[in-house]
Amino acid sequence: MTKQQSHQEWLADLESQSKKKQEALMNRIAAKLNRPRVLKKPEQPFRGAPEFWNEFSWSPQERIQHFTSNMEAAGGYVVHVAGMDQVKQFITTKAGDMSASRILRQNQKELSELNLEGALPQINISVWNDNPETDWRSTAAEADFGLVVADHAAAYTGSMVVMSSPDKGRSVSLLPTVLIVIIPIERLKTRLGEILVNFDEVGRESLPAGIHFISGPSRSADIENDLTIGVHGPGIVYALLVDQFE
C-alpha cells in the first residue's frame, strides 16, 4: 500500500487482483475440459429428499441387519442383546478381557441401574459431572472405556447419534480408548432423515451444544492416504442393540 492509497482503496485493489486470478483459473479449467464456463446459477426445481425416499423404510429385522453390516464395514462391532442384564454381562466380560482399569459413563438412570460398581469393584468407575471439582476432560482422556446411550441410530448409514447435556458429556464418547454405545432398539431408524427432522422440530434455540454422529472408530488418513485408527477418538467402538432397554 502506497502513501497515496487509502486503506479502502488498497483492499479494493487486492479484491480486483484476486478476482482476475480467479477468472484466469476458471478459464484454464474450462479450456482443459473443452467446454464453455457455466456462468449462470443452475436451476434447482427440487429441494430436499424426493418423496419416494421419505417413504422408504426397512422392517425392524432389516434395520438390524443393515445397521450391523454398515457399522462393521466401518470397523465397529455390533452385538444384539435381549435386555440390560446382557448389556451388563457384556461390559463386565469385556472389561476383564481388555484389562480395563477406568470406566467413565454418562450420568443416566439406566446406566446407574446396571450397578457396574458392584460388578467391577476392582475398576475405577466415574460418573460424568457428579463432582464439580473433577477435571472431566482429563478423566475422559484417561478412561479405558466410555459408556453412553445413543439418542438415535440410522441403519442406512450405520450411524449412532449422541447428544450432549449436563449429564451427558461430549468427552465420554470422544476421548476414551474404547467406546460402548447402548442403542434401544426402538431408536434404530431406517434413514438419517428420520432423525434429522427431530432437530428441525425442536428449533435451533433448543438444540444441545453437541450432536455427535458416530459411525465406527476414529479414522484418520494423511496426504498419502495412510489410514490410522484411533488418533482423534476411540479406536474400538461397540454398538449394543438392546430389545428391552428399561
Image (cartoon, rainbow, N blue to C red):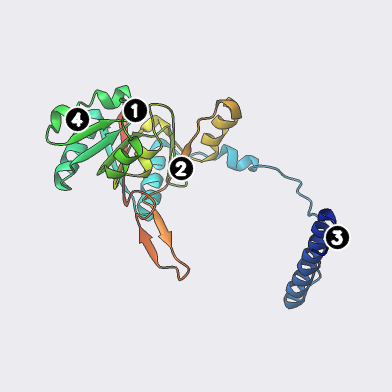
Residue tagged 2: 213
Question: Considering depth in this image, is 108 or 90 the residue closer to the camera?
Answer: 108
Disc nearer the start of the sequence (2/1): 1
What amino acid type should be assigned to the residue bearing mark 2? Phe
Q: Which residue is mark 1?
A: 129
Which residue is rendered at x = 40% and y = 30% of the image? 186
Which mark is first along the chain, 1 or 4? 4
Numbered tag placed on residue 5 in the rendering: 3
**What is the secondary structure assignment of the residue under circle 3?**
loop
Spatial separation of the CA atoms under disc 2 and disc 3: 50 Å
Amino acid type for the residue under numbered disc 4:
Leu
Question: Dot 2 lies on which element?
Answer: strand
Give residue 51's position: percent from left, percent from top.
64, 40
Q: Look at 36% across and 51% down and name the residue there.
A: 217
In terms of sequence position, does the residue under pointer 2 or pointer 3 come before the other?
A: 3
The answer for how far apart the CA atoms under marks 4 and 1 are is 17 Å
Asked whether, in this view, residue 222 is left or right of residue 138, the answer is right
**What is the number of callouts on the image?**
4
Where residue 72 appears, as percent x and y from the top left, is 35, 52
Gap in Å between the C-alphas at discs 1 and 3? Answer: 57 Å
The correct choice, above or below, for 116 with respect to 16 in the image is: above
Q: Quadrant of the C terminus?
A: top left
Rate crowding at label 3 as few (under 14), some (14 to 19) or many (20 or more) other CA atoms within 10 Å: few
Read off the residue under disc 4: 116
SS assignment at label 1: loop
Alpha carbons under labels 4 and 3: distance apart: 71 Å
Q: Residues within 10 Å of mark 2 (few under 14, many from 20)?
A: some
